[in-house]
Image (spheres, rainbow, N blue to C red):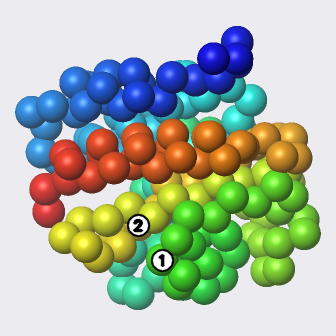
């Protein structure tokens, strides 16, 4: 494994242990964003947006203050919800309709969060460099979101 490659399987097991026994959604989202932020280098924002009244509303996060409301279909987060699939964006400035909450963000990855087969929000991660996220990061972060989903009780 390359020196800077994260062991997402190990991180998934650690996240599972961290969330085990806790049923509060906000507590689990908060700890998940803090946990990933601790291990994922070279990012400048990580957090969740939750579906509320047919739009995305800012949830627990680590980083600078962020956009509070995002319409479905708008920006990378809204696109992930409307297309029901993860988004890996190497250059946010080339993404049509990108919402610039932080001018320092250059690349982004967004992963839908599900409960009972319905999207309830997204994990959003920004980085201050272009092409920060690899396909391995995408797969690994999707694994971490799947681990989180096992601990969601609404």
Could you say which disc has been placed on residue 84 in the image? 1
Q: How many marks?
A: 2
49 or 12: nearer the viewer: 12
Name which residue lies at 41% across and 87% down: 54
Could you say which disc has been placed on residue 94 in the image? none
Residue 108 picture location, percent across and down: 71, 54
Name which residue lies at 72% across and 43% down: 133
Report if residue 108 is visible in the image.
Answer: yes
- Dividing the image into 4 quarters, which one contains the N terminus? top right
Residue 119 picture location, percent across and down: 35, 73
Q: Tell us which disc is closer to us: 1 or 2.
A: 1
Question: In the picture, residue 127 is in which quadrant?
Answer: top right
Do the residues bearing badges 1 and 2 touch, measured as CB atoms within 8 Å? Answer: no
Report if residue 50 is visible in the image.
Answer: no
Residue 84, placed above or below residue 8: below
Left or right of 115: which side holds 15?
right
Q: Which residue has dot 2 on it?
A: 121
């Amino acid at each position: 494994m390359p020196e800077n490659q994260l062991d997402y399987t190990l991180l998934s097991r650690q996240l599972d242990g961290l969330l085990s026994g806790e049923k509060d959604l906000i507590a689990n989202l908060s700890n998940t964003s803090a946990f990933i932020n601790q291990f994922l280098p070279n990012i400048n924002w990580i957090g969740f947006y939750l579906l509320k009244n047919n739009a995305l509303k800012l949830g627990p996060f680590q980083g600078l203050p962020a956009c509070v409301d995002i319409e479905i279909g708008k920006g990378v987060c809204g696109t992930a919800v409307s297309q029901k699939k993860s988004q890996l964006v190497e250059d946010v400035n080339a993404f049509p309709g990108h919402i610039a909450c932080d001018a320092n963000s250059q690349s982004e990855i967004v992963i839908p969060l599900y409960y009972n087969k319905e999207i309830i929000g997204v994990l959003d991660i920004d980085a201050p460099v272009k092409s920060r996220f690899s396909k391995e990061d995408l797969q690994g972060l999707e694994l971490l979101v799947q681990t989180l989903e096992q601990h969601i009780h609404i």
